[in-house]
Amino acid sequence: MKFAPQLGNSQGYGQAIVGEGVNSDHVERFYMNSYPINTRQPHLLPKLPPSLRESLEAYLEELEKLAISLLGCLAKTLKIDREVMLKMYEKGMQSVRMNYYPPYSKPELVTGLGTHSDGSAITIVHQVDGVDGLQVKQDGVWIPVEFIPNAFVVNIGDILEIWSNGVYKSPEHKVTVNEHTRRISIGVFFMPKQEAEIGPAHSLINSTNPALFTSVTMDKYLKEFFSRKLAVKTYLDHMKINKF
Ligand SMILES: O=C(O)CCC(=O)C(=O)O
Ligand SMILES: [Fe+2]
């Protein structure tokens, strides 16, 4: 199919191709880089129907503002200078994933989206029809994320865990499938600028609070994160200085 993702390029419509013989999730999805604009692939967004393209464009622009204000609040709680946060995240990388989870007669036999943590700094999820399915692991127990009308779910991703030097943790989460009802969600992922360094914020590190993670370029982070199957913190674990 024209819009299908390829091995090594997860953007497009359909299942991500992560390698041969890998179980796929029970979801149809459309995934693409949205910002900066020069990272967009010309065969995706421009080919969407104009009404969808315009709504999506407006949505992504508004969410960008929301993400910066949320990252501003998070930086404040970490006592990280706002300018440092802006330098890293303003006009940063953004990608969007629209998920359609079809109903399945034996939902216990499939996963909508397997257990993973997000590779982003933060993710803003809109559960479109208010249909349940998202679950988050807390103290070893899976907790359904309750749907709240007119509210987004904001998820902490691995980059924020690294940047906050472990103060914020990126939670394990997954999506289950319903027997009779389809579920639709839109996740927008926010990441630093392409030229940023991914590592603990310098202002948080001193002799009593040493860095728990190594630093890598955003380029390397993206390459290595996406070369792995969507999973729980495998790359974040790889960046830990003392594996704990
Ligand atoms: O469908 C959802 O509610 C969440 C999707 C998700 O976790 C993801 O796309 O990373
Ligand atoms: Fe996720």
Image (cartoon, grey):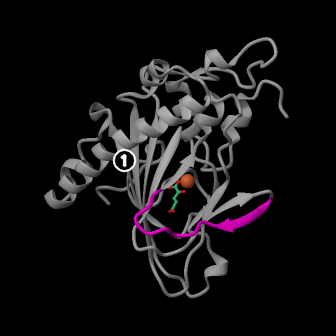
Mark 1 lies on residue: 32
Relative to 222, say whether 25 is above or below: below
Q: Residue at x 58, y 55 (%)?
A: 20
Q: Residue at x 72, y 65 (%)?
A: 142
Quadrant of the image containing the C terminus: top right
Answer whether residue 201 is visible to the viewer in this image: yes
Element assignment for label 1: strand
Residue 75: x, y in percent?
Answer: 54, 29
* Nearest to the observer: residue 205 or residue 96: 205
Answer whether residue 23 is visible to the viewer in this image: no
Label 1 lies in ligand 1 vicinity (Cβ under 8 Å) = no
Residue 61: x, y in percent?
Answer: 28, 43
Residue 95: x, y in percent?
Answer: 40, 44
Most common secondary structure along the magenta stretch? loop
User: Which of the 4 quarters of the picture holds residue 33?
Assistant: top left
* Nearest to the observer: residue 92 or residue 205: 205
The residues colored magenta run 140-152
Looking at the image, residue 8 sits to the left or right of residue 244; the answer is left
Residue 143 magenta-highlighted: yes
